[in-house]
Image (cartoon, rainbow, N blue to C red):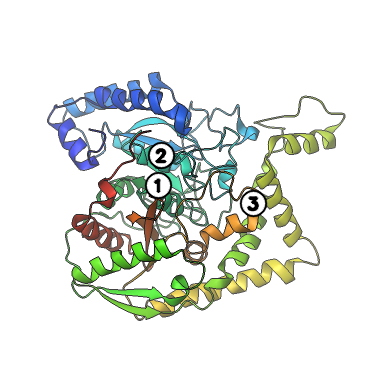
Amino acid sequence: MINTSLKELSAQLAAKKISSVELTQTFLDRIRELNPKLNAFITIDENKSLAQAKAADALIASGKAGPLTGIPVAQKDIFCAEGWLSTCGSKMLHNFVSPYDAHVIEQFNHAGAVNLGKTNMDEFAMGSSNETSYYGKVKNPWDLDAVPGGSSGGSAAAVAARLCPAATGTDTGGSIRQPAALTGITGIKPTYGVVSRYGMIAFASSLDQGGPMAKSAEDCALLLNVMAGFDARDSTSLEREKEDYGRDLEQPLKGLRIGLPKEYFAAGLAADVAQAIEAALAEYRKLGAQTVEVSLPNSKLAVPVYYVLAPAEASSNLARFDGVRYGYRAPEYSDLMDMYQKTRSQGFGAEVKRRIMIGTYVLSAGYYDAYYLKAQKLRRLIAQDFTNAFAQCDMIMGPTAPTTAFNLGEKSDDPVSMYLSDIYTIAVNLAGLPGMSVPAGFGANGRPVGLQIIGNYFSEAKMLNVAHQYQLATDWHLRMPQGI
């Protein structure tokens, strides 16, 4: 059952072969057994989850069920959920119980899904390894000495270890795709604005985007059908008609043009990752696709541009955490200014403080034009590179990450090296494009490799088709870690 697709689970629930309560209890038992090893979940509330499951069973019995009714879904702890501890992986919010639901949580509730719990994450989504969480490091179920990637590492580890059938994540610079790659699952970041950011605790508002993480592209299509949709409470939410993201899954790939950016296959790409990606591309050629070389000449600027813009937005967004209205407050202080200083010094971790300081610096008088404004101009050039590339191809493919999962602690003292693990994903966020990662084999050390698929704006259905056809021809997405 733990390796069963969402479509099959839904069919079993509809046929009364299993109840939502039984299904939810199965995963809660597995979490209880394995979470102490993996640290994938921050908060579990069995009573809340089972109450939702019981309500879902009643919906199914009344004939009013949808495709996800009764399906347990883990929620990244960046999404506010009414009555649930919502921490964003930070001491700053260690006692914050949300009084409302994020739009994404509302959508799942309306669909009759079960909230299985809140997953661990890098603090305020700042990190590439899930080592910055106040609640401790998450471990990769394929190798407990390795990182699962970040910031959605808790969700990725939970899906990979089959602690849940599916989970939500968020992607600001690769934080769905990179952990999906490092843990051998499927994850998609939609076009910016397709999934509402309302109730999603903000890191960098012009980059953050929620998306699904699951075993397969077919599962992700079902999840995205629920998550996507216009929300008037989010000024960046796009007012578009609802669409069925699974409508093209069975379309053949004959004639598909795949663009291979020469910059993604240059120095810095590990040989074992390159070998797995080449094998995946060979499979696509067998499926009728053709490959063409394209160029993204400004991609080398993506990392420095991102680490000017994202911290600038973070320094503004995180100003609200001051110890006055909610969250952590320093226990001892002499006056208001001292309370602000001590609260933020004690409440934020090292990586968050580093990014706040960088962001404040680049926005300060005398440096705004030199750094922030210039980065915005370069962002436009990076987006234009993709426009030019898509004139020659239908999809862009390459590695999701330059290496397989690195060891816990390996890059903790070298922030720049850590930042470079997102070198192939960041440009997609800067351009606002959709991107996804699918399992594509294993490296020399037995750790998973992810293939990145990048589409043009609003091409999620086609991307999921391209991924699904590959997954029909391979079984990488069905493999699960042993011995945890």
Identify the amino acid type marked 3. Ala
- Residue that badge 2 annotates: 141
Quarter holding residue 453: bottom left
- Residue that badge 1 annotates: 183
Residue at the extreme right: 334
The image quadrant where one finds the N terminus is top left
Residue at the extreme top: 47
Tell me whether the residue at label 2 lies in contact with that at label 3, contact meaning CB atoms closer than 8 angstroms: no
Decide: few, some or many residues near mark 3? Use Cα within 10 Å; few <14, some 14-19, many ≥20: many
397 vs 303, left or right, is left
Quarter holding residue 481: top left
Identify the amino acid type marked 1. Thr
- Residue that badge 3 annotates: 314
Q: Nearer the viewer, residue 308 or 402?
A: 402
Residues at marks 1 and 2, CA–CA distance in whole angstroms = 7 Å
Q: How many marks?
A: 3
> Residue 302 appears at what percent x and percent y?
56, 68
> Residue 394 appears at what percent x and percent y?
31, 73
Q: Residue at x 73, y 34 (%)?
A: 346
Secondary structure at numbered mark 3: helix
25 vs 343, left or right, is left
Mark 1 or mark 2, earlier in chain: 2
Residue at the extreme front: 444
Rendered position, 421 above or below 412: below
Q: Residue at x 51, y 62 (%)?
A: 426
Secondary structure at numbered mark 2: loop
Q: Is residue 454 visible?
A: no
The image quadrant where one finds the C terminus is top left
Tell me whether the residue at label 1 lies in contact with that at label 2, contact meaning CB atoms closer than 8 angstroms: yes
Q: Is residue 324 visible?
A: yes
Rendered position, 83 above or below 236: above
